Image (tube, rainbow, N blue to C red):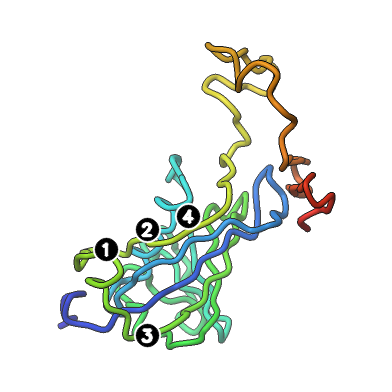
Amino acid sequence: MTRRASDRGWWSVRVELIGGGNAGELWPRPGRLFVVSEAHTFHVFAEAIDDAFARWDRSHLHEFTLPDGRRVTEFRYIEDIDPDRELDADTLTLGELLQAGDEFGYTFDLGDNWRHRCRVDGQDLDPRRVLGTVPDRPLPYWGWGVIPDAYGRLFDGDDGQTPIPDPDEPWPWANAPEPSIVTWHHPGHYTRTRNHATDRYNE
């Protein structure tokens, strides 16, 4: 029987969003660091990633790709399973298939292909020191970057044709300086930022 997560070793796992959907390729890549137990299943870790990357439409398949090319996916939604290439995300734990230093992939929504690069940064992490508690599920404890909306929506009711509404109050304030960092979004191709202070592109 699998022991509880609190009885097993803990890891730091880095997850970076490479791109997908209407956002195209992302640079710089937004990322999160997770406290993860080796006893957590891949399915539970997938849910934690989707929470941290603001996924509100969960009606899509997801899968992990291991360093050896095998896939960890949701058997309950698949009819034709290749046991040599596909593993069950609901039963297998990270500790059974990964070790420190391993890089692996995670894809949410196999149609829009929101791709993530994952890496086990280290083992023997103390969740009490990092989080102040021992969580039941994987939790992010550090992060960076802007998370794109899965459908490219910028505001509530955005249908791709309605003009962006004016803010309720003057924004950001009268005679405000130009922004120092500007983002260009080219749906289906890439998203990048430019820092006007250094006059260089982050790409």
Q: Amino acid at mark 3?
A: Gln
The circle on residue 61 is 4
Residue mark closest to the camera, 1 vs 4: 1
Residue at image coords 78%, 58%: 203
Query: Which tag, 1 or 4, sits closer to the chain's start?
Result: 4
Across and down, in percent, residue 157 comes to: 54, 19
The Cα–Cα distance between marks 3 and 4, rounded to whole angstroms, is 29 Å
Of the residues tagged 2 and 4, which is closer to the observer? Answer: 2
Secondary structure beneath dot 3 equals loop
Tell me which label, 3 or 4, sits earlier in the chain.
4
Mark 3: give few (<14), some (14-19) or many (20+) Cα within 10 Å.
some
Is 80 displayed left or right of 199 in the figure?
left
Q: Residue sitting at 75 percent across and 49 percent down?
A: 192
Decide: marks 2, 1 in contact (CB < 8 A)? yes
Identify the residue at horizontal 69%, vertical 54% (top origin): 26
For this rendering, which residue is in front, 183 or 116?
A: 183
Q: Earlier in the sequence, mark 2 or mark 4?
A: 2
Q: Tag 4: residue type?
A: Leu
Picture disc at residue 137: 1
Tag 1: amino acid: Arg
**Residue, disc 2:** 48
Q: Which one is nearer the viewer's eye here, 104 or 133?
A: 133
Residue 97 image offset from top left, x and y in percent: 41, 85
Q: Residues within 10 Å of mark 1 (few under 14, many from 20)?
A: some
- Mark drawn on residue 123: 3
